[in-house]
Amino acid sequence: MRLVASRYSCRSFSKEPVSLEVMQRMMEAARLAPSACNRQPWRFAVMSGGKVLDDIRGCYRKEGFKDAPVCIACIGLHGQAWHRPTDDKDHTDVDVSIAAEHLCLAAQALGLATCWVCSFDVEQASEILGLVDGEELVALLPVGYAAEGLAVPDKARKPLDDIVTWVS
Ligand SMILES: Cc1cc2nc3c(=O)[nH]c(=O)nc-3n(C[C@H](O)[C@H](O)[C@H](O)COP(=O)(O)O)c2cc1C
């Protein structure tokens, strides 16, 4: 519960680099995520430098994300996803989202900060990443150490009574 309560969307990063070892530990959290029928319909592009990262930074709407030294592209593989037989619902988005949130929680546990980013030009970002048919960019996660002075903001959330129905 402490981990869940301390995770927040960070939009301002220090430029301090993140070691490969820390990133590898973080990525293990995505590998262990559950998925429908265990299909694991995902791949992750971890960008920690170079032209692709520079170009992807151009897709962020918010300036603060650009300082994050790492960006993870969470990519869904529609061709590998489970489809519910009763209505053919494609579970790619569901599965990739679970893995992405595992990454966010792992980042927090490792002293890093991150933020879900879905507000990007999907065509532009997909081209930069070289995605092929059947691949979908579900989210970008800028990753780094939070800028100095940031604290966990108050959580603006609906009360439990508004969102839970206790059925017995
Ligand atoms: C699917 C999804 C997409 C999001 N996209 C963006 C985004 O493009 N830019 C942004 O600044 N925050 C984005 N967020 C972060 C939300 O605004 C944030 O989670 C929400 O306001 C709650 O705040 P908290 O994460 O700090 O608890 C996104 C979150 C989710 C789950």
Image: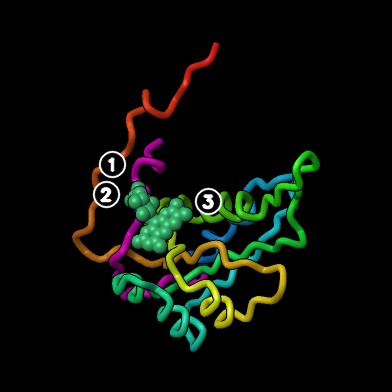
Residue matched to label 3: 102
Mark 3 or mark 1: which comes first in sequence?
3
Q: Residues within 10 Å of mark 1 (few under 14, many from 20)?
A: few
Q: Is ligand 1 closer than 8 angstroms to the Cβ of mark 1? A: yes
Please state the horizontal and vertical placement of residue 121, each as a whole percent of the image: 48, 73
Q: Residue at x 74, y 55 (%)?
A: 81
Residue matched to label 1: 156
Please state the horizontal and vertical placement of residue 26, each as a whole percent of the image: 52, 59
Please state the horizontal and vertical placement of residue 41, each as a whole percent of the image: 70, 58
Q: Residue at x 41, y 35 (%)?
A: 1
Badge 2 element? loop
Q: Nearer the viewer, mark 2 or mark 1?
A: 1
Residue matched to label 2: 152
Please state the horizontal and vertical placement of residue 160, each as a whole percent of the image: 37, 27
| Residue 146 quadrant | bottom left
- Residue 10 belongs to magenta span: yes
Q: Quadrant of ligand 1?
A: bottom left
Mark 2 or mark 3: which comes first in sequence?
3
